[in-house]
């Protein structure tokens, strides 16, 4: 039986024959092979290699997630986008004009928007029946659906 252990010093995964009591890590640390330390098991050395890669990828993935959580967001948060769109749509005007302006502003901000983005913006504008409003724009070919669930206005910000 073979297994994958993780070096406590350099945190890299290493394949090992589980009959061994210890194994030397390339970093120089002597890892004690204990059942608690075995992250994955394989019957043959051939099956072991991809498991080592998988455990290393999981270790790297965990680190990346932490780094992403600490990094500042690159895109503006949707809530800010919705607030900007709501502020940009004229307060005056008829329902159709304001709805088309909202779709154009959302498209300018996000490239494509979802029904959730749409509902939030229309709620902020005080326009009822967001679903019906979007369906009307789709029927009028003022908005199209380039990908299922994602919408785009034919107009952009004036
Ligand atoms: Zn090591």
Image: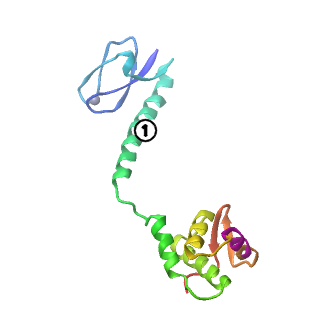
> Looking at the picture, does residue 129 appear above or below residue 9?
below
Q: Is residue 135 magenta?
A: yes
Residue that mark 1 sits on = 57
- Magenta-tinted stretch: 130-136
From the top left corner, tell me how far across and down residue 53 is, in percent. 44, 34
Q: Please name the colour scheme applied to the rendered image.
A: rainbow
Give SS at disc 1.
helix
> Image quadrant of residue 20?
top left
* 139 lies left or right of 101: right
> Looking at the picture, does residue 156 appear above or below residue 78?
below
- x 32%, y 12%: residue: 21
From the top left corner, tell me how far across and down residue 63 is, in percent. 36, 43
* 132 lies left or right of 42: right
Magenta stretch prevailing secondary structure:
helix
Tag count: 1
> Looking at the picture, does residue 46 appear above or below residue 92?
above
> Image quadrant of residue 80?
bottom left
- x 39%, y 60%: residue: 73
- x 70%, y 76%: residue: 137
Q: Is residue 66 magenta?
A: no
Q: Nearer the viewer, residue 133 or 71?
A: 133
């Amino acid at each position: 039986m073979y297994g994958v252990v993780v070096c406590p010093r350099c945190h890299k995964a290493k394949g090992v024959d589980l009959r061994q009591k210890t194994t030397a890590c390339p970093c120089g640390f002597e890892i004690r092979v204990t059942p608690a330390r075995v992250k994955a098991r394989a019957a043959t050395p051939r099956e072991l290699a991809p498991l080592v890669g998988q455990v290393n990828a999981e270790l790297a993935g965990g680190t990346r997630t932490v780094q992403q959580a600490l990094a500042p967001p690159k895109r503006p948060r949707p809530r800010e986008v919705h607030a900007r769109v709501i502020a940009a749509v004229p307060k005056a005007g008829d329902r159709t004009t304001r709805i088309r302006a909202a779709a154009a502003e959302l498209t300018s901000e996000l490239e494509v928007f979802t029904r959730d983005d749409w509902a939030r913006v229309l709620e902020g504008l005080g326009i009822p029946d967001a679903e019906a409003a979007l369906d009307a724009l789709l029927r009028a070919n003022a908005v199209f659906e380039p990908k299922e669930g994602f919408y785009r206005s034919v107009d952009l910000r004036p």
